[in-house]
């Protein structure tokens, strides 16, 4: 085989049948295991520079019951009312989400709720603002919506969530989109549309203990209380729109082990997310 033909063969070769830390099965369009087992793997705590702690032995209470199918989805009417009351416009919950294989009508609807952090704005060697959650520069959406940007590249996620709880749509939830290296460089086209991506605003600083440019230092705690609350609402709303509970995941755990893998979301506390989810589901049951 000529070098040219060999190169073309590599470019068009199908992805490995099972890939990544959490063993994504390309044929089944799913990570390995039950929803709870997938969530445990995909929600491993992410440390500095993407180092992962061990998977939790069990998911927190509410999320554990959700992944086990013991919590019914709220009705679309109830969630529509909630979004209106909270002034959160995500394009409604009565339309479908994206489908895998770049919108193939025979492919499954999106199954995964992927949490990112923006790692922006970057403060270099300067300290974070004293009021990191309320700071106007930190909470600005402007950097994520550059003027005259290529619509095939920007905005980089379906939804953006800042530290005061504001939500802005980047890509329509019905649009197949990819935002991790596992999707773009390893799985390829089958993954496009299977994942819904949420960017949470989080500034970064340089770690002086690491030579050269880096953005290794994130705030701790990483997320504001308002972000956890809004993230819980988004998780409920996107699951309702998808017609079933989505499996939560993180950018870093999806990309773990790949070259130039990302390290977000930093300092995400699954128990805080679980508590916010519990509060919101309990309030919806009362309604």
Image (cartoon, rainbow, N blue to C red):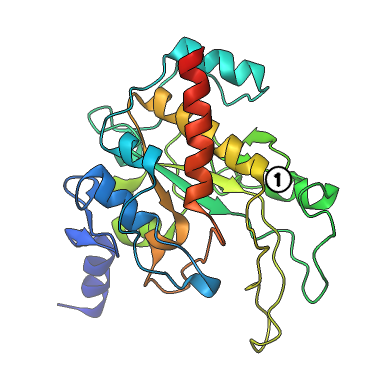
Q: State the image coordinates of residue 100 (x, y, percent, origin top left).
A: 31, 38
Q: Residues within 10 Å of mark 1 (few under 14, many from 20)?
A: many
227 left or right of 8 in image: right
Q: Quadrant of residue 126?
A: bottom right
At 32% across and 54% down in the image, what residue appears?
40
Q: State the image coordinates of residue 98 (x, y, percent, origin top left).
A: 39, 32
Vertical comparison of 126 with 200: above or below: below
Q: State the image coordinates of residue 264 (x, y, percent, origin top left).
A: 53, 61
Q: Is residue 190 visible?
A: yes
Vertical comparison of 49 with 285: above or below: below
At 47% across and 26% down in the image, what residue appears?
281
Circle 1 SS class: loop
Q: Is residue 188 visible?
A: no
Question: Quarter holding the N terminus?
Answer: bottom left
Q: State the image coordinates of residue 120 (x, y, percent, origin top left).
A: 70, 58
At 38% across and 71% down in the image, what residue appears?
258
Q: Quadrant of residue 193?
A: top left
- The residue nearer to you, when weighing 155 against 14, is 155
256 left or right of 17 in image: right
131 left or right of 13 in image: right
Residue where numbered disc 1 is placed: 163
Vertical comparison of 88 with 213: above or below: above
261 left or right of 2 in image: right
């Amino acid at each position: 085989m000529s070098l040219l033909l060999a190169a073309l063969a590599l470019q068009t070769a199908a992805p490995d049948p099972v890939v990544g830390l959490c063993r994504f099965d390309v044929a089944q369009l799913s990570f390995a295991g039950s929803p709870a087992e997938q969530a445990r793997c995909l929600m491993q705590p992410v440390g500095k520079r993407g180092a992962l702690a061990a998977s939790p032995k069990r998911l927190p209470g509410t999320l554990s019951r959700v992944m086990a199918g013991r919590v019914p989805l709220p009705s679309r009417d109830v969630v529509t009312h909630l979004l209106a009351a909270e002034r959160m416009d995500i394009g409604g919950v009565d339309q479908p989400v994206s489908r895998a294989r770049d919108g193939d009508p025979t492919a499954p609807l999106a199954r995964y709720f992927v949490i990112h952090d923006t790692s922006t704005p970057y403060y270099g060697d300067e300290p974070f603002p004293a009021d990191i959650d309320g700071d106007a520069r930190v909470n600005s959406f402007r950097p994520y919506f550059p003027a005259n940007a290529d619509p095939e590249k920007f905005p980089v996620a379906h939804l953006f969530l800042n530290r005061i709880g504001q939500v802005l749509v980047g890509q329509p939830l019905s649009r197949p989109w990819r935002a991790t290296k596992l999707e773009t460089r390893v799985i390829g086209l089958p993954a496009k549309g299977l994942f819904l991506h949420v960017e949470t605003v989080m500034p970064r600083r340089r770690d002086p203990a690491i030579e050269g440019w880096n953005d290794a230092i994130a705030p701790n705690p990483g997320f504001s209380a308002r972000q956890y609350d809004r993230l819980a609402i988004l998780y409920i709303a996107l699951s309702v729109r998808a017609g079933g509970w989505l499996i939560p995941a993180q950018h870093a755990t999806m990309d773990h082990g790949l070259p130039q893998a990302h390290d977000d979301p930093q300092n995400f506390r699954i128990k805080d997310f679980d508590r916010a989810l519990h509060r919101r589901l309990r309030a919806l049951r009362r309604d």
